[in-house]
Image (cartoon, grey):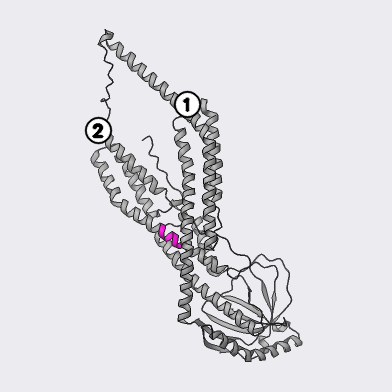
Amino acid sequence: MSGPKVDQVELERRRKAELERIRQERLNKIRQETEKLNTEISKTKAQIGYIDKHLSSLLRGIENTEEMEITIRKLNDLKSVYKDKLAKTLEINVPTEPDAISVCTRNLTSVTETIMASYSNEVEPLEERMQNFVNKLEVINTVTANSKDFIGEIEKWENIEDFDFTVNMGNVTRSDIKLNVRERAIQILSEIEEFVNTESIQESDMKDLLAIANNIYKTAFETENSFEAAAIEYNVIKPRIIKDISIFDDLYQDYFSEYIAYLELLNENRTEPIKITPEEKYRFSAIEELENEVLLLAKSSKALIENNYIREKINVVMRSFGYNLSEEIVFNNNQLGNHYICESESGKSAIHLHMSDGKRMMMEIVGIGDHVNRENESSVNAHITNTSELCDKEQEELLYEQGRFCELHPKIIEELEKYGLVFNKIGRCEPDLKYCRKINRISAGAETTDDNYKRFNERASERSKRHSIKEKRLAINVRGK
């Protein structure tokens, strides 16, 4: 390649501040719309839970009744069908435009309402049939029980006229205190069940709640004093749990909007946009994990918006000097920073520009070789032809172009400085044969992705593989205790 010209490049403080203001303004719009979207996502998930609870309440106590076997099977089939329909509505590739996010939210609301209306219409006749059967059972059981009591009482009395028909409801096998403890235990366990099954619970809070639930199970049917200790422990931590859930929800919304804003910046120069929805709440085990993710996304977005700005201004300046817009190239899967080439109008040479992660910018002249077609599933889309592989004519032409670039480079820097870029000179290499190389582009490569984006996905993959109590929720069964 040609004699490299290396500078440390930064943006003026005022320019940085302006870009950050623009980013925050955009982020706020995205947050407003994604907050509405997440509200509707939660409502759709709640409807999935409603179908489960609704059918469970219908089937309670008659699961093994042969007379209703066909009806029960139909109800279970409907449950599976409609839960799947609702789950599919949640497979959303969230757009990055606020208006498009709004459309996505309205569509989700509409589709969910349509699905639930259809579910109600199909379930209603089966539910009516089930309720009629339950009512019939209750009548039969009541008549049977009353008949037994009536006959039993008659057998105790010699004269029918002496029989007392008044029903005595005061006879209970448990004391009033014991019954009160049991009812309170069921109430607390119901609350714990609701907390444990929310996606916004931290793992540490969940473990605390499950420990208390275990205590209550053990003490609810012993003495009132032992139960009271467990109940007091629950009431002490309950406000903290509620506060943590609120913090978790707010941070998750920050994460969600930062992620969408970051994807928007990442896709700014891509012909094939990346469409990936942020991780779901249950993937995060703690508030601190969400906080770190939000900070990393914000930091990466700031760097990306600055890089996009620099690339945009490079395109403007290069065009004014007769070069085409920059094209991103990838030499290997592990390369650092970003590489671009701006071809000359002749198409025989180009300016190769490398932006390092440390904001070092290197420019040099390279030759442009033929496109290479090959099987290639990686992001690599270019390779280098070394000096020794070039013919004398190619070397001579590149040396000439290097000489011309020595005069052109200061002018490029001067123009870029007008857009708020600040350059600190590091190195200027003179033309030399050892820098004469060509870049050959590979036609079949996939588009490159940002290193930070790859790291986000790697962490998401680790979260999904990691054993998590949040992924194995223990639904506490408080009914019938």
Which of the 4 image quadrants contains residue 254?
A: bottom left
**Is residue 229 found left or right of 193 in the rendered image?**
left
Q: From what the image shows, is residue 139 above or below residue 277? A: above
| Viewer-proximal residue among 70 and 109 | 109
The residue drawn where x is 47% and y is 49% is 43
Q: Which dot marks residue 176?
A: 2
Looking at the picture, tell me which residue is in the foreground, 54 or 228. 54
Q: Look at the image and give the residue range highlighted in magenta.
A: 249-255
In the picture of the structure, the residue carrying the numbered disc 1 is: 133
Residue visible at 27% across and 36% down in the picture: 180
Q: Quadrant of residue 200?
A: bottom left
Image quadrant containing the C terminus: top left
Q: Nearer the viewer, mark 2 or mark 1?
A: 1
Left or right position of 406 against 451: right
- Specify the amino acid type for callout 2: Asp
Query: Tag 1: Cα neighbours inside 10 Å, few (<14), some, or many (≥20)?
Result: some
| Image position, residue 232 (x, y; %) | 26, 47
The disc, 2 or 1, on the residue closer to the chain's N-terminal end is: 1
SS for dot 2: helix
Q: Is residue 231 visible?
A: yes
Residue 288 painted magenta = no
Q: In the image, what residue occupies the spot 72% across and 78% down?
A: 369
Return the x and y of residue 323 as percentages of the image width and height: 66, 82
Q: Amino acid at mark 1?
A: Phe
Camera sees residue 220? no
Q: Quadrant of residue 400?
A: bottom right
**Relative height, residue 144 to residue 311 (above, below):** above
